[in-house]
Image (cartoon, rainbow, N blue to C red):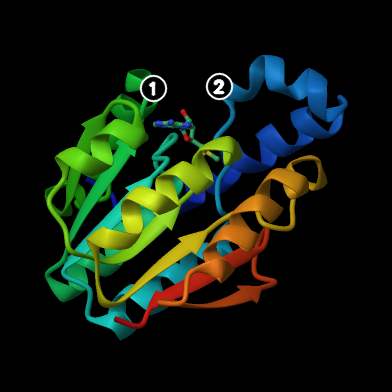
Amino acid sequence: MSDFATVLAAYETRAADDLQRMRQVPFEQMLSFREEMLLPVGPEAGAFLDHLARGLKAKRILELGTSYGYSTLWLANAAAAIGAKVFTVDIAKHKQDYARSQLEQAGLAKSVEFVCGDALAMIDEIDGPFDLVLLDLWKEAYVPALEKLAPKLAPGGTIVADNILFPEEVRDVAALYRKRVREMPEMSTVLLPIGQGLEVSRWRA
Ligand SMILES: C[S@@+](CC[C@H](N)C(=O)[O-])C[C@H]1O[C@@H](n2cnc3c(N)ncnc32)[C@H](O)[C@@H]1O
């Protein structure tokens, strides 16, 4: 077994290689090999999620978009420290299998429940209330996911939505999410220029 820092370092190496490959082609071409990419939230957003989970004293954390487990590692590290549980959802089983093996290596798998399937269906299957949600699906799913998530938030529960500013190619779709979440009177929202842009929305109820 290795530790959090060792597993994180291996992810960062793979992320740097991915980035180099992605930079060589236009965005539309990258979509053809998107499934092979980690597409991680990155270290600044990872650390922010860790701070937030601890500050909220979260008990139930929901992650929509496990991918290969980069953000899951950060969330699980915080969860293990505060006695929380991370429920992480992705439609791609092979990605979750990889994520599970990395979390096991880091000694953090006990804090995580992996749920494989369409997030829009799985939100109904996982019991709330959620203290913290990371929303990091393909961006078209953000608004429908928000509609299902809002009633399942704990008072003070917080949704962090990634990729609000970058990549630029998804900014228009992300803007639809920003508009919808800011229309919700129970939500207090702020955009943070951390990583690829995080829309952070707190349920006031
Ligand atoms: C940007 S990646 C997530 C990156 C991850 N949070 C990280 O930081 O490493 C988006 C992931 O969402 C998954 N996804 C997209 N739409 C989905 C849906 N409707 N249901 C479940 N998973 C979905 C994709 O398979 C992909 O792995």
**Vertical comparison of 91 with 51: above or below:** above
Does the Cβ of the disc 1 residue fall within 8 Å of ligand 1?
Answer: yes
Q: Nearer the viewer, residue 162 or 143?
A: 143
Query: Residue furthest toward the top?
Result: 32
Say which residue appears at 17% left-offset and 75% top-offset.
Answer: 82
Say which residue appears at 59% left-offset and 29% top-offset.
Answer: 37
Does the Cβ of the disc 2 residue fall within 8 Å of ligand 1?
Answer: yes
Mark 2 lies on a secondary structure that is helix
The x and y percentages for residue 142 are 51, 46
Q: Nearer the viewer, residue 41 or 172?
A: 172
* Residue matched to label 1: 92
Q: Amino acid at mark 1?
A: Ala
Assign the N terminus to one quadrant of the image. top left
Q: Is residue 25 left or right of residue 62?
A: right
**Quarter assignment of residue 77:** bottom left
**Vertical comparison of 2 with 122: above or below:** below
Mark 1 lies on a secondary structure that is loop
The x and y percentages for residue 148 are 33, 49
**Quarter assignment of residue 151:** bottom left
The x and y percentages for residue 203 are 36, 76
Say which residue appears at 12% left-offset and 70% top-offset.
Answer: 83
Residue 44 in sight from this viewpoint: no
Q: Is residue 36 left or right of residue 55?
A: right
Assign the C terminus to one quadrant of the image. bottom left
Q: Amino acid at mark 2?
A: Glu
Q: Nearer the viewer, residue 88 or 174?
A: 174
Residue 15 in sight from this viewpoint: yes
| Residue 35's disc number | 2
Mark found first going from the N terminus, 2 or 1 = 2
